[in-house]
Amino acid sequence: MLTIIPKVLSQQEVAACRGDLEAADWADGRITAGEQSGAVKRNSQLPEGSPVARKWGDLILDALGAAPLFVSAALPHRTFPPLFNRYAGGQDFGIHIDNAIRPVRGTPVKIRTDLSATLFLAEPDTYDGGELVVETAFGAQTVKLAAGDMVLYPGSSLHKVNPVTRGARIGAFFWVQSMIRNDTDRMLLFDLDQSIQRLAAQQGIDAPEVVRLTGIYHNLVRRWAET
């Protein structure tokens, strides 16, 4: 399941972030790639220890914590500190799958990559190409979003970034370890939660069916959650 999380960052925040990124020192994007993905990865990336990456990574995580759609879709347990990349001049990232486990640099923490996320930081009309293409059970899905919007998709998906032939595609990317390991279970909980929210808006949060369905939702979370 692909989930679009709109307006994670405001236009003003995107502009401030872009200003900091333009003044930062970029490195070869293969610094965080595994052996297979490193062979097909051509982009630039901020080093994980970059002060700019830490500053804006923390701001992105704070914004996501206040985004109900993200919490509903991801049911996050741990989130990898966001990284930042740039594609220009024909750069791309060939078909690959993300590493299943990501160690957080400088800590003993390791994160299982249940979900992958890309936050777009350049407006789509400022660059050609650069689409994120995710292989799903329903075929390949192509994603190219407005600056400040984010896509969330299963970390088990094959995916690629098409070559950027004009301008620059700039974004943040990271991974989420969900409390719900199984993609299908997580999708069912997301659909149920969204239905409860719509029903509550129509009938009120204290309506008997809303209360009953909310209880079912939380009992399923208790059954499936890993914390």
Image: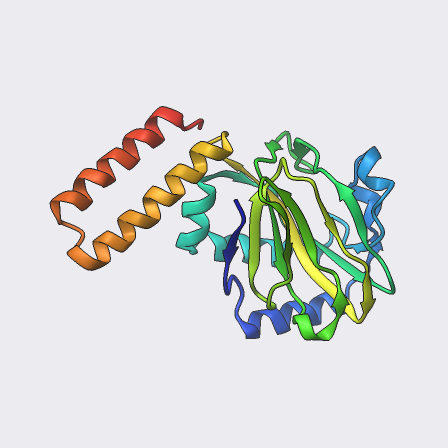
- 116 vs 188, left or right, is right
Q: Quadrant of the C terminus?
A: top left
Front-lying residue, 68 or 198:
198
Q: Residue furthest top?
A: 223
Q: Judge whether 45 appears above or below 38 on screen.
A: below
Q: Judge whether 10 appears above or below 158 on screen.
A: below
- 173 vs 179, left or right, is right
Image location (x, y in percent) of residue 158: 69, 40
Q: Judge whether 104 appears above or below 173 on screen.
A: above
Q: How is the image coloured?
A: rainbow
Q: Residue furthest front?
A: 138
Residue ID at (56%, 57%):
150
Q: Quadrant of residue 107?
A: top right
- Residue 49 seen in render: no
Q: Quadrant of residue 99?
A: top right
Residue ID at (33%, 45%):
193
Residue ID at (43%, 32%):
185
Image location (x, y in percent) of residue 77: 48, 36
- Residue 126 seen in render: yes
